[in-house]
Structures are given as structure tokens and as C-alpha cells.
Image: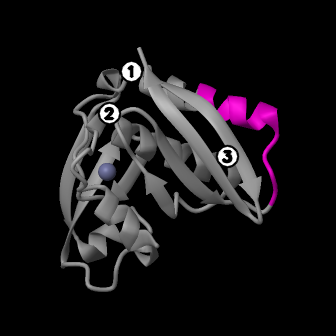
Amino acid sequence: MEQKTQLNEVKKDYHSPMHTAEHILNQTMVRMFGCPRSMNAHIERKKSKCDYRLTEMPTEEQMAEVERRVNQVIDQHLPVKIDFLPLEEAAGIVDLNKLPANVSDTLRIVRVGDYDACACIGDHVQNTSEVGHFKLLNYDYQEGRLRLRFKLVE
Ligand SMILES: [Zn+2]
């Protein structure tokens, strides 16, 4: 599943503001619900969707809070930085269990300010000021999977 996310990230219609928003959303979901980062994401220019494994359906208030927090991070105009770290050093920063087994000795770590760090090969904006704003369109929950759809607005 995780490998599929990696493939999505180099797709043709790949959109770096959307993808950067995905990083922020992932970290926000991890912090709020203690869930893993999205195991299945479909990121496109106009509209994106991410799936999360949650043990119960979030409340409307919680989902509004997700949107609020993502925008709060974006509005801090955080720098997005790339580091290349040896695997051992990266282990203290990101969850290596999520990576494919054949990963190289050096990892490309993408940081959104001090808010998020994850291993990623995709393209990102250089500052969250380039993302625009995160708009949660809708979500549904079935059998432990929350699927949410979002777009970026001015
Ligand atoms: Zn990325």
C-alpha cells in the first residue's frame, strides 16, 4: 500500500502545493488521532483524497478542527526543506517501517518547518505560503477507513 503512495507521487498530473498539503494533513491526522499517515492517497491538481485507518468515525467538530489546524500550519509560512540523511540517522526522525524494504542507504527527508518530517521523493513547494488554503470537501467512514477529499483554495 505504501509503495502505491510513492508511485502516485511521481505521476504526471502531480501537483506540488497539493502534495505539500498532504504532508501537513498527514501530520495533523497523526497528531489528532494517533493514526498512521495516509496509506492510500490520490493527489491531483483539482481535488485530492486521502485514506486513514481510524478505529472510530471522527465527529464533525474533529473534522472541522483538522481543516482549521492544517490552515493554521500553512499560515505560518513555514519553509519546506530537503535533507539527505543516512538511514540510521533518519530512523530517529521518521517511521522507517512504512518504507519499502529495498530503500537505499540515504533517505530524502522532507521537513515542513518543525511540524512534519517524512521520507519522500516527491516535489514540494519551498514555503507553505505557496500552498493556498486547505478546504475539506467531504469525508466518509467505513470499516475503519476514513476517506477525505479536499481541494486548495486561495
Ligand atoms: Zn512529499
x then y, percent, for residue 70: 53, 32
Q: Residue at x 18, y 78 (%)?
A: 105
Q: Quadrant of the C terminus?
A: top left
Residue at 61% x, 25% y is 68
The residue at the point 44 percent across, 44 percent down is 22
State which region is magenta. 56-68
Asked if residue 142 is positioned above or below residue 82 in the image, the reply reads below
> What secondary structure do most residues of the magenta stretch adopt?
helix
Dot 2: what SS?
helix
Q: Which mark is residue 132?
A: 1
Q: Earlier in the sequence, mark 2 or mark 3?
A: 2
**Residue positioned 53% across, 51% down in the render:** 50
The residue tagged with tag 3: helix, strand or loop? helix
Disc 3 target residue: 32
Q: Residues within 10 Å of mark 1 (few under 14, many from 20)?
A: some
Q: CA distance from mark 3 to mark 1?
A: 22 Å
Camera-nearest residue between 8 and 34:
8
